Amino acid sequence: MSGLIGKKIGMTSIFDENGKNIPCTVIEAGPCVVTQVRTKAVDGYEAFQLGFDDKTEKHATKAAIGHFKKAGTSAKKKVVEFQDFETEYKLGDLVTVDQFSEGEFVDVQGVSKGKGFQGVVKRHGFGGVGQATHGQHNRLRAPGSVGASSYPSRVFKGMRMAGRMGGDNVTIQNLRVLKVVADKNLLLVKGCVPGHKNSYVIIQK
């Protein structure tokens, strides 16, 4: 799907024409540079590689600097491939937020906030024992029994347990575009998107 790389700025709310307050997320979407053009003849498929957010040469490898120099641009921090663009682009072209329009729906992908090692109540929504069963008084948020009897004498794979939570690739689908501020490269979408402030997100049509 065609799209753009962006950066999550934060959340706010705006009023629609009926006076209803709508929560929305502000995304700095692009401008992105076409850093590579994939063709069927060479690569076996058609796609455009876009780069976003400048990186200093000090923090880039020589291979990366040479790769971006072909497109006539500086090294980029985030690089993503997109397919099925309606417009044909050439190496070094800029892709801006203008490709989105108010009222259409987009999918936004990002890495969710990492929450560290969490127990089963927070991670999986377990209810706890509620201080009322079998005389337990200090095991309120424990997972309880995890294994079967003498057979199979092991814990089955996939058992919901405590562990690291967050830091996953998450895609929120069908978010409505509320506003496009082309001169500031801003996109306002209804609702929330995954990730912390200033994290990279991928917006797809």
Image: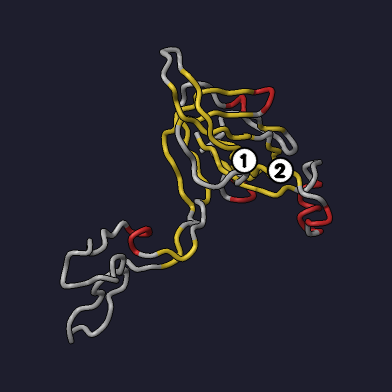
Which residue occupies the extreme right position in the image? 58
Q: Residue at x 42, y 67 (%)?
A: 163
Q: CA distance from mark 1 to mark 2?
A: 9 Å
Q: What x and y, as percent, mark residue 148?
A: 20, 79
Identify residue type, mark 1.
Answer: Lys
Which residue corresponds to the image point at 32% horizontal and 68% vertical from the top-left? 158
Residue reaching furthest to the top? 17
Residues 97 and 120: in front is 120
Whether residue 116 sits left or right of residue 54 in the image: it is left
Which residue occupies the foreground of this view, 99 or 122?
A: 122
Residue ID at (66%, 35%): 30
Left or right: 116 with respect to 65?
left
- Seen in the picture, residue 89 relative to 124 is either above or below; the reply is above
Tell me the residue that label 1 is attached to: 7
In screen coordinates, is 108 left or right of 65? Answer: left
Q: Mark 1 or 2, which is nearer the eye?
A: 1
Q: What's the mark number on residue 53?
A: 2
Q: Amino acid at mark 2?
A: Asp
